[in-house]
Image (cartoon, rainbow, N blue to C red):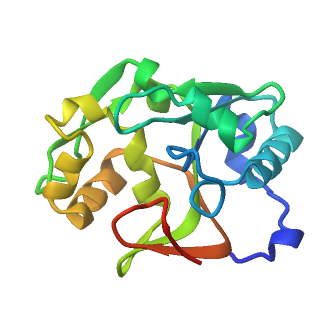
Amino acid sequence: MIYEASDFVFTPPARLSWARRVLIKPCAHFATPYPVTTSPEILNTIIEGIRKVSDADILIADGMSGGESIYPVYQALGYNFHNVLMLDVRDSIFLEMENPLSQFFATPTFWAPNLVLRSDFLISVTPFKVCGNSGCFSVANLLSLLAASKYQRGGWDALYELGIDKVLADLYFTLPFDLGIIEAQQKFFYTDDPTKGRQ
């Protein structure tokens, strides 16, 4: 579904109403505002929509590729939401999740934080970003949930070396998410540096 930004009211799927814990995964691993990262405005709209149908605990989580604390980034982006638990994935216990595909594309397992498995509903919220000729949307947004330290030197770059399209295909089947929201008031195009590009 496509909405005008000014008309967007988040109406959660019916099954979210039984969730006890909802995890929102923004694109927040840079201290650069929208359209590089998810805006606090759309997150607030989603939080308000969840609260209309559920008393679930709401968590927001992301991580940094170098293992730095993400809390200064949350602060720089204006992520300040009432009764929402802000988490840094580096503080999680990571579990090795087996790829359910009998013939995987790139990797047989992923190291994911236990907070994903302990959540009843996972929402991936990302800006409309294009790297070269490829879109970076809901599934690609989940990469920063993974344990960068588990992928040898270079962190997530090690996954790119396996072929990012193949990795994302495996991730789609291995790390279940319930809803993807693309924030597309602006489109952001970049090549090497995800914080520098054009709109």
* Residue under the point 53% across and 31% down: 70
Q: Position of residue 3 (x, y in %)?
A: 77, 75
Task: Answer with the quarter of the image where residue 110 lies.
Answer: top left
Residue 161 lies in quadrant: bottom left
User: Which residue is farthest bottom?
Assistant: 133
Q: How many marks?
A: 0
Residue nearest the observer in this picture, 45 or 116: 45
- Regarding residue 22, the answer to whether it shows in the image is no
> Between 22 and 69, which is closer to the camera in this rendering?
69
Quadrant for the N terminus in the image: bottom right
Which residue is drawn at the image coordinates 88% and 71% (left, top)? 7
62 vs 103, left or right, is right
Which x, y percent locates residue 20?
68, 27
Relative to 198, does residue 58 appear above or below in the rendering? above
Q: Is residue 9 left or right of residue 39?
A: right
Residue at left offset 60%, top offset 30%: 72
